[in-house]
Image (cartoon, rainbow, N blue to C red):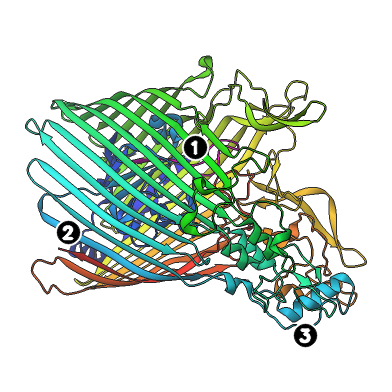
Amino acid sequence: MRNFLLKITFLLLAVNAFAQVLPTQLDSVFNDSVFFKNEMTEVIVVGYGTKKAGAITGSVSQIKAADIIRTPAQSAIQAIQGKAAGVNIVTNDEPGAQPTIRIRGLGTITGGQNPLYVIDGIETSGLNGINPSDIATINILKDASSLAIFGQKGSNGVVIITTKKGKKGEIKVNYDGYYGQKFIQRKVDMADSYRYAYYNNTALGSSSYFNFEQPYNTDWLDEITETGQVLSNSVSLSGAGDNASYYFGASNYQEKGILSGTEFQRTNIISKNEFRLLNDKLKISPFINISIAKNTPKPLSAFTNAYKQSPIMPVKYANGRWAGPFVNELGVNDITGDKYNNVANPVAQLYYANQEDKNTTVIGAVNAELELASFLKFNSNFGATANWGKGYTFTPTSDIWLSQNPTEDVDTFNTYSNALEQRRSTSYRWNWDNFVTFNKTFAENHNLTVVAGLSRTTFGISEFLNSTRYDVPSQANYWNLNLSSNNTEIAPGLVTQNSTATPIVSVAYFGRAEYDFKGKYLLSASIRREGVSAFEENKRFATFPSVSAGWVLTSEDFMQDITLLNTFKLRGGYGEVGNGYTNRSLNQVLFGGGYNYPFGPDQAINPGSSIPNQVDSSLTWETMKEVDLGFDFAMLRNRLTGTFDYYSRKADNVILPIAVPPVLSPGTVPLNAGAVTNKGVEVSLKWQDAIGADFNYWVGGNFSHNKNELKEVYNPLFGEYTGGGLGNGQYTKQVLVGQPLGSFYVYDVTGYTNDGSFTYSDQRVVAGSYIPKITYGLNLGATYKNIDFSVDAYGVGGNKIYNGKRAQRFGGENIESELLDSFWTPSTPNAVNPKPSNDVPRASTYYVEKGDFLRINNITLGYTLPKFFEKIDKVRIYVTAVNPFLFTKYSGFSPEVVGDNSGDPLGTAGIELDAYPTNKTFLFGLNVGF
């Protein structure tokens, strides 16, 4: 802390000296130039209230509507990638998918890693149900002193969304729409038929098993992909009178994915009103957003199968049957012959994948604000999110079997011909917050704001029903469970499954006090006492405090001569936030179902239950403790603005699965057993200026560095905790003390054997983590008269990616073309790649690649037509290129790999396997306001 303050002091002295020696002509230039708005006066939404940016003592990033809609996307989170320091967003271009967001690293291993989303006071788990055009601002709370007021729900950060509202004046109507086409951003060149035959003949030690003259040369990626399309239309109606304001919006988003058959459609309706009653002493603000989504997904493993399937195989044979990996005695693919790999026909795989999901999500709230006195008001806010889902999957089992056995007849298939699965689900969560706000100025210069209240959240209210029937009519119009001719159990497991979750309840009492003197000295402190039903009664409650302070140095008399600085604020804070694991109960005995046991002389199978593991009754909260130090500034007549943050956070009592002796528990037991740290710096800068009356421009950027580490494990029974499986018996990750979470732990390639195979280290080595060490964003733009132009970019560095699709081999698969440019032979012993082989490869550093990349997220050129009709405020047309350029050394489809949806650092995050490639999109749009 002392060194930090000394550095700031020297910086201010340097600035002061610089200001004194500047020519007086420079100051006159500033006086004659445009004054830019001081961003310190912007209103920031925080927990249970708002504050001006200049009064913020924590670390908060704000993204405004103009920055959100600049990158057209179905999710607003995807649109703000690279626009906030310390916020790592991994996009996912699969239609309807959610991006992954991590704020200041990863602090837990087995718990939830996603932030809390608050939409106009409603707590939700994501933003896919909100149209980005309806959002006014997104405020991201990053440090513990800002998060502590939200308790355990904010342990991974809080994303506060404020939707648009009507403004006083005439009725305003706005239309936003665009149409675009989507393409794979980058392809991987695979071996053609000749090179495939050459490689695999070499691997088999044969010169003729595969004929070099093949009748087919199939490009499987081209066969399963097509030009995607996106269409979005949004219209809004807004306005306000003396006693009421209103905002109504309707939108429709449609996307056709690059993977053949994938589609997503969402329709949104939003209504936000505010009614002022009792001489403006009472405000009632109802809000509702309805989202109806329809999704037609396809298996993403088709991408991996297209990568691995041989080019010598056609899509179909001449007789119309689906082709398979069979080679005849002439060494060419034929309907008869020997099977040479176990890869599915990816086109047939997509053809027979019949799934459709529909979801209706309603987000609603009613907020009442009553002014009890000029300095005291009471707020009550009830918000709820409800989701109803339904879907079906039709699996033509006999047709799939025939596609894999083209020489057989359907009569030889002796089990059910098809299966129809239907799903129904409901989920509901609600939060009710009641608090009073005291705000008063004493003796002109002393400003005091106190917030106190209570909050209750109930979620995990859900039910899931899944039913399967067999041998239903094959026509799509008759896919109905009631038309099944076979309702008996055919495979292990139940034909009908029904599950109901136990709701999780969070109850909290909170308070916050904020004091400032002349807007110069700022102090804030909060405390939250919270209980969560996920723990046993004696461990449910914990208390989480925070304190932060700020000093606006430019308000001091000794700073008045520094003319270059408009605002300079030092700030620092400390806070503690619990992680209550509110998605499941960890210290209550749970029974696992779906077990089958043989009993009796005939060993008949009987269904049963089991206790998968014992529990620790003393299990308690994980606690994140964080120190944040930083400063905000504006200088050169607010042309140059920026922020700097240094943070150090430690998650203590981290819950890990501990392998206790089997006599105590048949499985691992979750115990408070470790600590995870994240340390880093964040810098944001923006320069904006005008040249003359018609030309304005801006250049901005942000940079973040984070060091993630499992600092310690203080339970001696903690053993190997591995993950990152490839499906071929190899795992790639392990949790290790002193290393980042999600570290790749593989064998190091040390050289070649005499016959050209790899040699490996005796023990596994750490080969890096998928978690980036640095993230950065760049943006620039300009307007000249009616023309506007902008560019946004995003990049990461210091992370690794495991090329899983290349590593998941069993034998006979295709290979990348470049592998044949340099592989081991007796005459090329120093080649980059080993000799051709059909063996299952060992998990090794050979497949670990740098994940660094810089991507141009969007380039937009727009033109606003001159006003040609009095009633029309604006007509703007624009063209946008989304993700047009990518700079990376990674050899796969995309260096952005989301992995599975669980967020598990030991899952497939950072492993390119069954991954949806990043798209580039070119679109045309129109904005109209009247």
Q: For this rendering, which residue is in front, 189 or 403?
A: 403
Residue named by callout 1: 464
Q: Quadrant of residue 608?
A: top right
104 in the magenta segment: yes
Count how many numbered circles sit on residues in the image.
3
Task: Decide which of tag 2 and tag 1 comes sooner along the chain.
Answer: 2
Question: Given the image, on which type of amino acid does mark 1 rest?
Answer: Phe
Q: For this rendering, which residue is in front, 597 or 75?
A: 597
Q: Residue at x 68, y 60 (%)?
A: 401
Q: Is residue 770 above or below residue 507?
A: below
Residue named by callout 2: 173
Q: Cβ–Cβ below 8 Å for labels 2 and 1? A: no
Q: Quadrant of the C terminus?
A: bottom left
Question: Given the image, on which type of amino acid does mark 2 rest?
Answer: Val
Magenta span covers which residues?
103-119
Q: Is residue 639 above or below residue 58?
A: below
Question: Given the image, on which type of amino acid does mark 3 rest?
Answer: Glu
Residue named by callout 3: 213
The mark lying in front, picked from 2 and 1, is 1
Task: Decide which of tag 3 and tag 2 comes sooner along the chain.
Answer: 2
Q: Cβ–Cβ below 8 Å for labels 3 and 1? A: no
Q: Residues within 10 Å of mark 2 (few under 14, many from 20)?
A: some
Residue 367 at what x, y percent from top left? 23, 33
- Which label number is shown at residue 655? none
Residue 876 at what x, y percent from top left? 24, 70
The mark lying in front, picked from 3 and 1, is 1
Q: Is residue 15 above or below residue 584?
A: below
